[in-house]
């Protein structure tokens, strides 16, 4: 977003001064390389990207890289800007998989140079990247990315609990069916061959999975048939 961060508590990076000095020593600063000395307003950032040909993002190979979600790449997608990214995070993997640009290994200077030249000169590749960027962009629209959150808010029951509740409903349905069959006399002959232990076991089963009321109802059904 710029060179001088608006927050005075943010320390200036030593790499920034090194970059300044290198560009000066090579006589590239303010001729081929331009640094925005201030800080771009966030709501105006797209104006700079729309005037660009390539969006480049480089970072070291580090655990922080793997865990980050780099919004800068989202801005590149938003402005239909072919991307060059170092590897190591989920969005660089997407750039590679969806063919939104090119990726290089962290610290691979020659690879980065070749990637820049390729995206500057290869019109067919540029066109392909832009077409793929247009296809990918809608997947990051708010109405799509917030769907999982909305679904959770509408039904915040944990999956394990939901599964257990569904299994309980299935068991209760089966017990209700057994009771209906019993009341119709379709199971009477089989039940008459069962002993006291069987009925106690069934009563406890109903008590555990269906509650006291269901267990009592089951007992009444049995006694009514005796």
Image (tube, grey):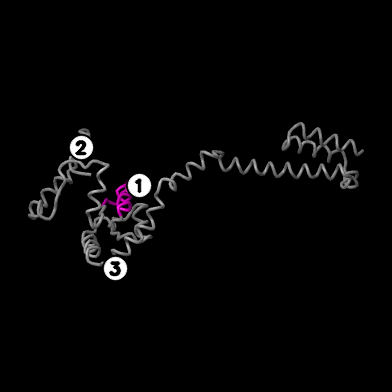
State the residue in front, 84 or 49. 49
The first of marks 1 and 3 along the sequence is 1
**Measured Cα–Cα span from mark 2 to mark 1:** 22 Å
Screen quadrant of the N terminus? top left
Residue 124 shows which numbered tag? 3
Sooner in the amino-acid sequence: mark 3 or mark 2: 2
Give neighbour class at mark 1: few <14, some 14-19, many 20+ (Cα, 10 Å): some
**Residues at marks 3 and 2 touching, judged by CB atoms closer than 8 Å:** no
| Residue under numbered circle 2 | 11
Instruction: Give x and y (percent) for residue 180.
Output: 82, 43
134 sits to left or right of 54:
right
Alpha-carbon neighbours of circle 3 within 10 Å: few (<14), some, or many (≥20)? few
Name the spot of residue 176 as percent of width and height, x first. Answer: 78, 42
Residue 122 rendering spot, x and y as whole percentages = 25, 67
Question: Camera-side residue: 180 or 60?
Answer: 180
Taking the spot 30% from the left edge, 64% from the top edge, the residue there is: 127
Q: Which residue is mark 1?
A: 69
Nearer mark to the viewer, of 2 and 1: 1
**SS assignment at label 3:** helix
The residues bearing labels 1 and 3 have C-alpha atoms spaced at a distance of 29 Å
- Residue reaching furthest to the right: 226
Do callouts 2 and 1 mark residues in contact (Cβ within 8 Å)?
A: no
Picture layout, residue 178 above or below residue 110: above
Q: CA distance from mark 3 to mark 2?
A: 42 Å
Q: Is residue 59 magenta?
A: yes
Magenta segment? 58-79
List x then y, in percent, for residue 164: 63, 42
Give the SS element for disc 2.
loop
Q: Quadrant of residue 165?
A: top right
Which quadrant of the view contains residue 156?
top right
SS state under label 1: loop
């Amino acid at each position: 977003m710029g060179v001088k961060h608006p927050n005075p508590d943010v320390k200036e990076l030593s790499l920034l001064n090194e970059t300044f000095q290198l560009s000066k020593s090579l006589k590239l600063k303010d001729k081929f390389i331009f640094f925005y000395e201030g800080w771009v307003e966030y709501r105006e950032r797209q104006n700079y990207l729309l005037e660009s040909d390539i969006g480049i993002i480089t970072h070291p190979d580090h655990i922080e890289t793997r865990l980050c979600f780099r919004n800068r790449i989202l801005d590149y997608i938003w402005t239909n800007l072919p991307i060059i990214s170092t590897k190591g995070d989920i969005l660089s993997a997407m750039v590679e998989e969806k063919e939104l640009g090119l990726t290089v290994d962290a610290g691979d200077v020659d690879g980065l140079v070749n990637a820049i030249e390729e995206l500057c000169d290869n019109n067919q590749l540029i066109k392909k990247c832009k077409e793929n960027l247009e296809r990918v962009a809608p997947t990051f629209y708010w109405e799509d990315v917030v769907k999982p959150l909305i679904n959770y808010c509408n039904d915040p029951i944990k999956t394990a609990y939901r599964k257990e509740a569904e299994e309980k409903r299935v068991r209760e349905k089966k017990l209700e069916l057994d009771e209906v069959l019993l009341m119709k006399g379709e199971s009477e002959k089989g039940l008459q061959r069962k002993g006291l232990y069987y009925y106690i076991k069934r009563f406890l089963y109903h008590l555990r999975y269906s509650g006291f009321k269901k267990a009592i109802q089951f007992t009444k059904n049995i006694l009514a048939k005796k």
